[in-house]
Amino acid sequence: MHLENNHIKYFLLVSLLLVFSCMNKTTNENIKNDITESNYENIIEIPDDFTNSKIDLGDLVSSVNYVPLETKPICFIGQINKVLSDTGFFFIHDKNNNSIIRFNAEGKFLNHIGTIGDGQGEFKEAYDVSLNKGKREVSVLDLRGRKVINYDYDGNHINSLPMKFLFNQMEYIGDTIVCNIYKSYNTSMPSIYGYKIVKTNKKFDVLSKAIPYQVNNTNSFTTERPLRKFGNSIFFNDPYRNKIYKISPRNTYIEFIMDFNKSGWNQDLKFEELNDAEINDLFESYSYFNGEFVASTRYLVFNIYKKNKSGTIYYSQKTGIIKYGNSYTNPKNRFQLVCFSVPKWLNYDDRFISAIEPFHLIQYMEYIKEEAGSNLTKVQQAILNNLKEEDNPILVIYELNDF
C-alpha cells in the first residue's frame, strides 16, 4: 500500500497556517468545552475476515441512478473533490481547477460559484466549500486569502468575512458554524489552541470548543476531511482513532465506535506524539479506520485497512447488522459492477453518491458489451452510446436495501 494515497502530507499547509497564526492576537480564556458523554453509541464490531469476504451487490443495492455531468469548455471538471447537493442541484468542488460548478438534477450546467482573483467576491483558493441550505447560500473557504466568501446559488456575491482564527473546514448547522481547527496553529488564541473543533456564530466569534489534543509537530499525518456533513448532521472523525463524533449546536458526543478487538492498536496511544516512522509501523502491524466514511440517516459506510489490504463496512444503524468485504459479486449487469464504488457523498434525499470517470468505463467497454442487449437498461445503453473519454464524470446515485 502506498501511504501517499491514503494519508495527507500537509507541510505546506502547516507553514501557511503558522504564518497566519501570528496575525491574530485575540484571546478568550472562557470558551466552553462542550464535549459530553454519549447516552447512545453504535459499537461496530469489525470482523477479522473483512479483507477476504465479498459483498453481494444484488442483495446490497435496491436502485441505481446515473447522472452524466454535462461537458462544455465552461464547465470542464478536472477532479471532483466534493459533491454537495440540495433539492434539484449538485455543486461540484473541483480543487484541481479551483472552481465550484452548479448542475441541475439531470446534470445540466447552470453556473459557476465565484471566480479566481483578488477583487471583491473573488477567491485565491477555494480550499473548502459548504452549503447553508436554510439561506440557499454557498460558502467558499479561501485559506490563502484568509476569508470566507458567501454567494447565493446563482453565484452572486453576498459578502466576505475575515477569518478570525485558522481553520481548514467549516459546516453549517442552523446559525452555528462548526470549524475543523485540528493542526491549525492558533497560537495567538490560547483558549482554542490544542483543540480539534470549535463552534462559532455567523461572524466567526467562537462559542465553544471540543476534543482536546496534545499539540506536537513530530508527525505529518492527518485524515482527509475529518469534518463531514451529511443531510442535517455533522460528524467529526478523530483522525486515526476508532471514534466518530456527532456535533449539535449544544454538544459534541461519540456516535460511532469501531471495535477492532485485538487487531487494532491501543486507543489510549497518544497518536500526536508519535513520529512518522512509528506511525508507519502501526499501519503495518494493525487494522485501522482511515477516516473515509459516509453516514445517512439509516446507514454508516466506511473503509478499513489492514496492511496492504482494505475492506468496506456497511452498517445498519437500526438493526446493527453489517455487510462487509473487499469486492462485489452478483450485480444486475456488468455496467453496474464497473460503475459501482464505495460512496463518498450523500444526496439531499439520503441516497449515496459516488462518481466514475468516462475513461474508466471505456477501459471496460468490451467486457460490458459481451453482456449487452437486454441486460442493459435504456439509460445505461444511452450512456455507452454517447461516451467520450474526455467527458465529465458520471455521478452514480444509489439506495441500499433494508437489512
Image: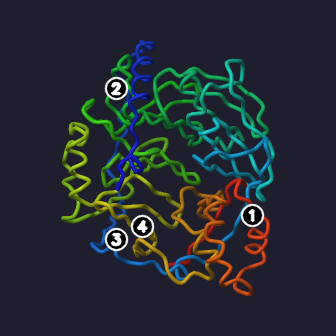
Residue 274: quarter of image:
top left
- Say which label, 4 or 1, has the lower sequence index: 4
In the image, residue 13 lies at what x, y percent?
A: 44, 29
Measured along the vertical axis of the image, is residue 78 above or below residue 262? Answer: above
- Say which label, 4 or 3, has the lower sequence index: 3
Measured along the vertical axis of the image, is residue 55 above or below residue 394? Answer: below
- Amino acid type for the residue under numbered disc 1: Leu
Is 97 or 297 nearer to us in this picture?
97
Residue at x-position 35% and y-position 46%: 238
Residue occupied by mark 4? 312
- Say which label, 3 or 2, has the lower sequence index: 3
Residue occupied by mark 1? 387
In the image, residue 387 lies at what x, y percent?
A: 75, 64
As drawn, the label of residue 136 is: none
**How far apart are the two marked residues, 4 and 1, measured between alpha carbons?**
29 Å
As drawn, the label of residue 51 is: 3
